[in-house]
């Protein structure tokens, strides 16, 4: 059974647009959004489906290529703390077990 309230990401998938476009629709007043627990932004599923069937929102078909170099750069950008911690742990283990 599907939930009555859906996330911005689920809304973007239903409307076949980007999450940025969904946020723009919310800000312009074309979509009504609700804050749950004063923290999470949700939309009513039936309102999103109604907008999709009405044709008010044009789906986006722009696909951006994600190159290998961008993937590597993003990996190091988002995991730099963990990689640095791994190096420090490796050095500490070397000092503990390999030095007299």
Image (spheres, rainbow, N blue to C red):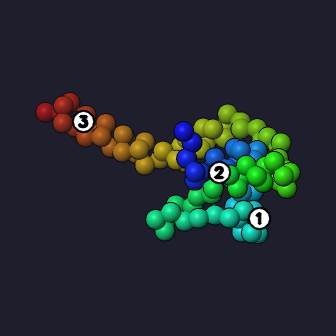
* Disc number lying in front (3 or 1): 1
Residues at marks 1 and 2, CA–CA distance in whole angstroms? 14 Å
Q: Is residue 38 visible?
A: yes
Q: Residue at x 66, y 41 (%)?
A: 70
Q: Find residue 45 and name its label.
A: 2
* Residue that numbered label 3 is attached to: 93
Mark 1 or mark 2: whose residue is earlier in sequence: 1
- Identify the residue at image location x=63%, y=64%: 33
Q: Which residue lies at the image location 86% right of the left edge and 51% below the top edge? A: 55
Residue 95 drawn at (x, y percent): 22, 37
Local crowd size for mark 2, using a 10 Å CA cut-off: few (<14), some (14–19), many (≥20): some
The relative height of residue 89 versus residue 41 in the rendered view (above or below) is above
Where disc 2 sits, the SS reads helix
Mark 1, residue position: 30
- The residue closer to the viewer here, 36 or 23, is 36
Nearest to the observer: residue 22 or residue 98: 22
């Amino acid at each position: 059974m599907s939930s009555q309230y859906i996330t911005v990401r689920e809304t973007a998938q239903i409307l076949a647009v980007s999450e940025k476009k969904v946020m723009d629709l919310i800000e312009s007043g074309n979509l009504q959004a609700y804050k749950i627990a004063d923290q999470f932004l949700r939309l009513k599923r039936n309102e999103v489906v109604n907008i999709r069937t009405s044709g008010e929102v044009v789906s986006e078909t722009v696909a951006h290529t994600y190159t290998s170099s961008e993937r590597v750069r993003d990996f190091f950008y988002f995991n730099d703390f963990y990689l640095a911690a791994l190096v420090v742990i490796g050095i500490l283990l070397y000092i503990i077990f390999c030095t007299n």
